[in-house]
Structure formats: C-alpha cells, structure tokens
Amino acid sequence: MEVKEGSSIVCKAVSAEPKIMDEPINIIGAGPAGLTAGIVLRKHGFPVKVFEMSPEVGHRLNGDFQGLENWSSEKDITDILKSVGIEINFLCEPYYGGLVYAPEMKPVEIKSDRPIFYLVKRGMMPGTLDMGLKEQALSAGVEILFNHRLDKFEGKAIVATGPKGADAVAAGITFTTSMKDQAVVILDDNIAPKGYAYLLVNQGYGTMVTVLYREYRKEYECFERMMKFFKGNMDMDIKNEKRFGCYGNFFIWDTQVHHSKLYVGESAGFQDGLWGFGMRYAILSGYLAAKSLIEDSDYDMLWQRELRPMLETSLINRFLFERIGHHGYRYLIKKFANGNPCDFLKKHYNYSFFKHLLLPIARKKYESRVKDQNCNHENCTCVWCRCGAKICP
Ligand SMILES: Cc1cc2nc3c(=O)[nH]c(=O)nc-3n(C[C@H](O)[C@H](O)[C@H](O)COP(=O)(O)OP(=O)(O)OC[C@H]3O[C@@H](n4cnc5c(N)ncnc54)[C@H](O)[C@@H]3O)c2cc1C
C-alpha cells in the first residue's frame, strides 16, 4: 500500500521576503484558521484586519478539551506548528494512550511510545488554543475587530468562518473532577451512531461528549446513554457540570477560491471526515492561504497538494467506518491494541491507491449540504454563498 505523508511539505518556510503594504489583508473569522493566517501574514510584514462576529475568540466552543491528532504525519504536530510560525503558548498536553470500549467487549488499553494526541482546551478562557492564538496575533500586530459580523464582503479576503452545516453533531458536558488524567473512547452505535463518545480529563477538569454522524434527532437520548455508560462502568466524579452542543462540517470542493476570496478551515469543508480532527486542517490551511498571498502563488494548488490526499482519504474512511458496525469496531480496537496505534492510524489516514478507488462513491455520499438560502445569486458578494460553485443553482 502506498503511503504518502500528508502535511510534511507544509512545513517548508514561506520563501518571500517580508513586505511593507498599505492595504490590509482582510480575514473573516478569528478561529484557528483565520488567526493562523493572520499571524503568518503579519510576521511577513502584511497589515492584517480580522473581523470576528463574537465579542471574543473561542465563543463557539465551550471550554471543552479537544485532541490535536499526532498520528497522520511523521513529524510531531507541535513541531509542525512551530515550523509554520505558531508558538505553543496554550495548554498542549501529550497523551500516550487511553481506554477504548466497544459493545460486548472488555475495555482495551491502548499505549503508544509517542503522543497519540495533544490535549488542548477550546473557548474563551485563559490557556485555550483560541486565546493563545489571539495573544500571538495581537503581539504580531494583527488588528482584530470583535462584534463585526460580515455576511457580505466585496474584494479580496480570507474566509475562515468555520462550519455552516452539520455533518456531525456533538452533545456533551464540561465539569470539574477529582478523577485522574485520562482519555477514554466508546465506539457504540447506541451511544454515538456512526461516531464515538469520549471522556478527557486533565488536571481536575473534564469533558465528556458524544459525537453523532447519523440520527441527529437522538442527540439527547445518546447523551443520556453516554452518561449512564460512563457512570456505570467507571468511577465518575462530576461537579459543576455545564452542558453544550455543537456541530461540524466536511466536504471537498475542487476550488477554494471564489470571487477573490480564499476559503480556509471548516468554512472550506477542511475537516477530518472520519472523526472530526479538524484543528490540524484549520491551522495548516490558514498557513497555506497566507503563504499563497505572501509568495503570490496559487492557493488551490497549495491546498490540493498538501491537504487534499488526506481529506479524500478521510472521506473514504468515513464511508467504510459507517459500514463496519459493532463487529468492525471490535476488530478495529484489537488492531489498535495489538500494534503501535500511531502507525496503524497513520497508515489509514494517509493516501492509498486502492482505497482511493472508492473516492467517487464517498464524494457523492458526502456532498456538502450547506446552502445559503438568503442569497439571490446575482452579483453575489456573500461570504458564505458560492455562486458559480456547484452548490448554487
Ligand atoms: C464538540 C467538538 C469537538 C471537536 N473535537 C475536535 C478534536 O478533538 N480535534 C480536532 O482537531 N478538532 C475537533 N473539532 C473540530 C475543530 O474544533 C474545528 O475543526 C476547528 O475549530 C475549525 O477551525 P476554524 O478556524 O475553521 O473555525 P472556527 O473554530 O469555527 O472559527 C470560526 C470563527 O469565525 C467566526 N465567524 C463565523 N461567521 C462569521 C462572520 N460571518 N463574520 C465574522 N466572523 C464569523 C466565528 O465566530 C468563529 O470565531 C471539534 C469540534 C467540535 C464542535
């Protein structure tokens, strides 16, 4: 099986000399994708203005823990971040293993000699990825305009507005706890249809979430089942519980340049279609958009080269994962446990010729459902709508 490294070439430094310009580059959305683009551009001398609709970064997130996956590239993700100009000034804790549950099976312990993922916190509080990136952007000289929602914008911009449709929905809680640091995953269609549920604990704070890729209406039911499962199978201690719900969006279009706007992160559908590990894509696509502006190179060419093989593989993985059922989950878990989980995941997250034979079916199945109903599609300057792209009639 041919295995290509998805994001290794991305780490090549931007080659152009710093520039002095008068007109700012406009970025819409201050999530990881938009802020990364802003930081990189500003470090190369470009004035940058970021428009953020919320009063603070991380407003969409809830103080929940997320995992920065560390299996799809040979190079450690923290080194990749540093090589694209992002400092680690936020909670970024390596996790080397965890426990995985599947129906009718004892829990299986997974261990790795390299971090499987780095735990980061998301939201508006100190220590989150969002606040760390904001701090880096501001100290680089990026101007961030909060409470500025832009639905229409004429001219050049980087669009980093995050998901606009739900291909997966999540329901969970954050809480304080006396439990030890740990990561636990459940693969069970009764708790998370075609998705997974997880518990992450770090330093007395926890997150428990179920992620549904099907049967969204059962969100509440699945959440309750997840709670019951964890309480029944583990020694849980939950205080100061806060509920939250959220969603994610993934799709692949052939161009991410529409009316002089470069689309990055989840607004471009850049997301791990299998399990929703989108932060890597958000940060790297923000970097690539900045790189294309700095070097005056073709953004489509850059993301297609650096991100597309893995994006396509993730869509095919989703297609296959939805078919394997409980029996398949048990098989998968045994595979994780019997070898090096990072090697196993890396092989399956990267390009494979044979797997790619399934791409046409997978793309058809996961076409984006995102539509801007408010657009009349005449001389469109909408941030979100893509007249000319196949989604608009
Ligand atoms: C519950 C949950 C768990 C997740 N877990 C993981 C995980 O474990 N690992 C992982 O890698 N990924 C995870 N993800 C996915 C990850 O959070 C996203 O892929 C990532 O945040 C996308 O970054 P972004 O910058 O593209 O968009 P966002 O983070 O959504 O940022 C977009 C920003 O744009 C702003 N905005 C939107 N519209 C406008 C407008 N019109 N004008 C101005 N501003 C606007 C928003 O307010 C927001 O601040 C998870 C997602 C969810 C919901």
Image: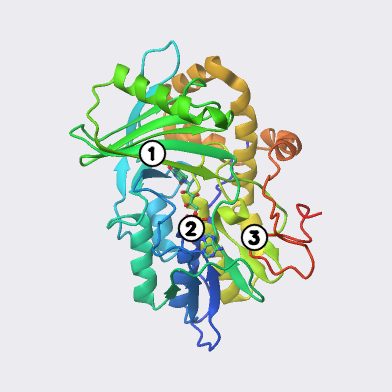
Residue 249, given in percent of the width and then of the height, sits at 58, 46
- Is residue 108 visible in the rendered structure shown here? no
Q: Residue at x 48, y 66 (%)?
A: 52
Residue 272, given in percent of the width and then of the height, sits at 55, 43
Residue found at the very far top of the displayed protein? 104
The residue where tag 2 is placed is 283
Q: Looking at the rendering, which quadrant does residue 385 occupy? A: bottom right
Q: Which class describes the residues within 10 Å of circle 3: few (<14), some (14-19), or many (20+)?
A: many
Q: Looking at the rendering, which quadrant does residue 339 occupy? A: top left
Q: Choose between 55 and 324: the one closer to the eye.
A: 55
Indicate which disc, 1 or 3, sits on the residue closer to the N terminus. 1
Which circle, 2 or 3, is nearer the viewer?
Answer: 3
Amino acid type, residue under disc 3 in the picture: Trp
Residue 246, given in percent of the width and then of the height, sits at 48, 43
Q: Residue at x 56, y 53 (%)?
A: 266
Q: Is residue 274 left or right of residue 82?
A: right
Is 361 drawn above or below residue 191 in the view shown?
below
Q: Residue at x 47, y 51 (%)?
A: 279
Location of the N terminus by quadrant is top right
Q: Are marks 2 and 3 in contact (CB under 8 Å)?
A: no
The residue where tag 1 is placed is 116
- Is residue 198 visible in the rendered structure shown here? yes
Which circle, 1 or 2, is nearer the viewer?
Answer: 2
Amino acid type, residue under disc 1 in the picture: Ile
